[in-house]
Amino acid sequence: MIDYIAGLNEPQREAVTHGNGPMMIIAGAGSGKTRVLTYRIAHLIDRGVDPFRILSLTFTNKAAGEMRHRIEKVIGNEARNIWMGTFHSVFAKILRIEAKALGYTSNFSIYDTDDSKSLLRAILREMDLDDKVYRANAVFNRISSAKNRLVGPDEYLMNPILRADDESARMPEVGRIYKEYARRCFQANAMDFDDLLFNTNVLFRDHPDILHKYQHKFQHVLVDEFQDTNVSQYLITRKLAAVHQNIAVVGDDAQSIYAFRGANIENILNFQKDYGKDTVKIVKLEQNYRSTNTIVQAANSVIARNRNQLEKRVFTDNENGPLIEVIKASSDNEEGRLVATSIFEAKMQQNLRNNDFAILYRTNAQSRAFEEALRKLSIKYRIIGGLSFYTRKEIKDLIAYLRFAVNQSDEEAFKRIINLPKRGIGDTTVAKIAVLASEKNIPIWEVVSNITAHIAGRASVAIDQFSDLIKSYMLLLDKKDAYEVASHVAKTSGILKELYEDKTVEGLARYENVQELLNAIKEFVDNPDNEDKSLSSFLQTVSLLTTADEKEDDGDNDKVTMMTIHAAKGLEFKNVHIVGLEEDLFPSQMMLESRADLEEERRLFYVAITRAEKRLTFSFAESRYHYGRLKICEPSRFLMEVDQSFLTMSKAVAPPKPRFKGDDTYASRNKDEMPSAGSMNFVRSLAQKTAQRQIPPATVTHTPSADFAPSNTAALAAGMKVEHAKFGFGTVKSLDENGTERKAIIQFDVVGEKTLLLSFAKLRIV
Ligand code: ATP
Ligand code: MG
């Protein structure tokens, strides 16, 4: 067993070994909060707590997977039995078990945002409301925010404040839309994402026996990224922990970045109040193990500008490391090129892999320029978020078939597949069926499976055939696993055939995507961690994947990661590029209505900075296309807010190009808005300041852990089993003694093959 206690500092150890009772760790980035939670769970199990009785809530399913894996390293297979996942996935599981109590069946569908908006649009049409006034997006956000504050439709309609707010937004009917939306979801045996939390609260509120069961079951509740829980999530954890009072939460108020989604920093303040000031064990973690001194201090200098924050200290014993480089580009495309080149050079000079790099941006739309530039240099990359695999049309189509086979009340799935492939059933017929079901308050399937009783004519024959097809699928559900059913559906529904016959390049790609989905289902079925191999169970897993949970399309894992800063929470990379540091883009113009908004954007910047371990690079462009217009950009105020002594201008500054000549956008602007007026001053002052820069030397040089010290590796030989501080266990494949640096090629159990420089590698022979 790994001696996990040895790899902890004193306050971390205190938190890991803390006995019973509530505990809160609010500490800075990279101080080992997640590590403490992980080892605490291992410790609890080591001390005899049944893993089935531990509930651990993480930010992404991937984070849960990684945590589980690390715990497995310490305590073995038992780790599989921990209840671990995102709030949504864990509570979807409980709702499935308890569905009956709420009038649902356990195979309820989970509506994604597209489904929700499509349903809202249908309701708007039926209610004869103008969808230019009532935009589906805006209505959806209002309903979502009500749910996250636990306001149901009836309460909504009776709440004068909400109604007045809707009036002033010129959408007085939101309450009625909400009510109809909720009714239709229920009738479709479907829950949207917010319902998963809302309904869990209803379940625990209205069914004390069920609450009682889970309160007793979960002896320990642990929450990572506590700062980003919303009221609804907080109440669930509070109820669940009410009996044993063993709740451990970790978070960082300086990294709270979901206020717009209802996350509530008050939770941190309430925690002490709710559990009693004298009862709550508070642990402070102050030492950052992730980043260089430069990065830690730069991050501190930024966050110090926020008025609204809890007082805490973050320091590191790590080396100073290089200064933060600032890249100025003349355009967004050039920014892409300069960043890609910088990655290319760093890879060569520092012998790094693609995996060691991340490009973080404020919005997904910014990825394009970097994609192009990286492709030109043949650097592989992955985009997390963006248009993900599961949002592609052909994938959603097959999934809709599978959803409808499992839940025949699923109105949105029905609408998607009823005329796919084409069966000559028009939109009018489909709308007629939906209205019929809605008016009679019966599931859509009752109309469809008895169509001749409702509609006459050609369409009814086609619908009859469709309903026979679905019935044949329903018969398979109990007998076959998810993969067998799904491949049967793909073949017999006509989806594969249609794509196969489409001989265009896109058609072929779509065909392959469907095959890829089937592969993913096969993997799900073959995975020993998944006890329930039914189609219904697979569908639940798929609907709750977050954008950060994306699976690799190809087998190659060594890629530069590109993602929004929101998605990067909790992660770390050796080299980080924070790009698009321009006013209006970051801080985002759309978000800036108040000081609170600016502070949230600043926290986002803090999160971005603190992802970096060794090297951090900022970049900004002086112009970029925005909604089809060339826009002149100013460097972000955040660049000025960083203590300037930690910055240095990149030498890769491109010579200014006269590319604006004859450009209308430019010509029409006044002189004050010349592309580089502001930024050149900034660059000049930056250059002066950085020349005088001095970082106070760190007092102690930090060695991560005696166990993982590089000096242990002298005796390394091929075939040996080793453990790496980060990559876990592996076997040495070969040693490369030829170059100036001694290297080992190691096959790690989890992350695959890595080449490590032995003078740096934190390896331990096991
Ligand atoms: P964030 O706020 O970004 O979520 P965090 O507080 O959760 O960060 P971790 O991710 O747990 O921090 O830890 C940051 C890094 O420091 C990890 O690589 C972790 O393995 C390492 N680390 C944490 N504590 C120690 C320690 N005592 N000794 C060596 N390394 C440590
Ligand atoms: Mg963490």
Image: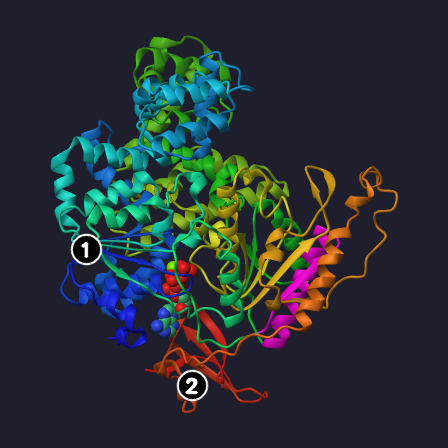
The three-letter code of the residue at mark 2 reads Ala
Magenta stretch?
Answer: 322-350
Task: Give the colouring mode of the picture.
Answer: rainbow
Q: Position of residue 88 (x, y in %)?
A: 33, 43
Is residue 526 or residue 714 the one in the foreground?
714
Q: Which mark is residue 1?
A: none
Local crowd size for mark 2, using a 10 Å CA cut-off: few (<14), some (14–19), many (≥20): few
Residue 332 covered by magenta stretch: yes
308 w.r.t. 145: above or below: below
Residue located farthest toward the right when viewing the structure as drawn: 662
User: How crowded is the residue under tag 1: few (<14 C-alpha within 10 Å), some, or many (20+)?
Assistant: few
Question: Looking at mark 1, is its residue's CB closer than 8 Å to ligand 1?
Answer: no
Q: How far apart are the alpha carbons under marks 1 and 2?
A: 55 Å
* Mark earlier in primary sequence (1, 2): 1
Q: Is residue 749 visible?
A: no
Question: Residue drawn 81% across and 42% down?
Answer: 666
Q: Quadrant of the C terminus?
A: bottom left
Q: Which residue corresponds to mark 2?
A: 718
Q: Is residue 176 left or right of residue 689?
A: left
Q: Position of residue 150 (x, y in %)?
A: 31, 31
Q: Within the displayed image, which quadrant is ligand 1 positioned in?
A: bottom left
Q: Residue at x 54, y 64 (%)?
A: 298
| SS assignment at label 2 | loop
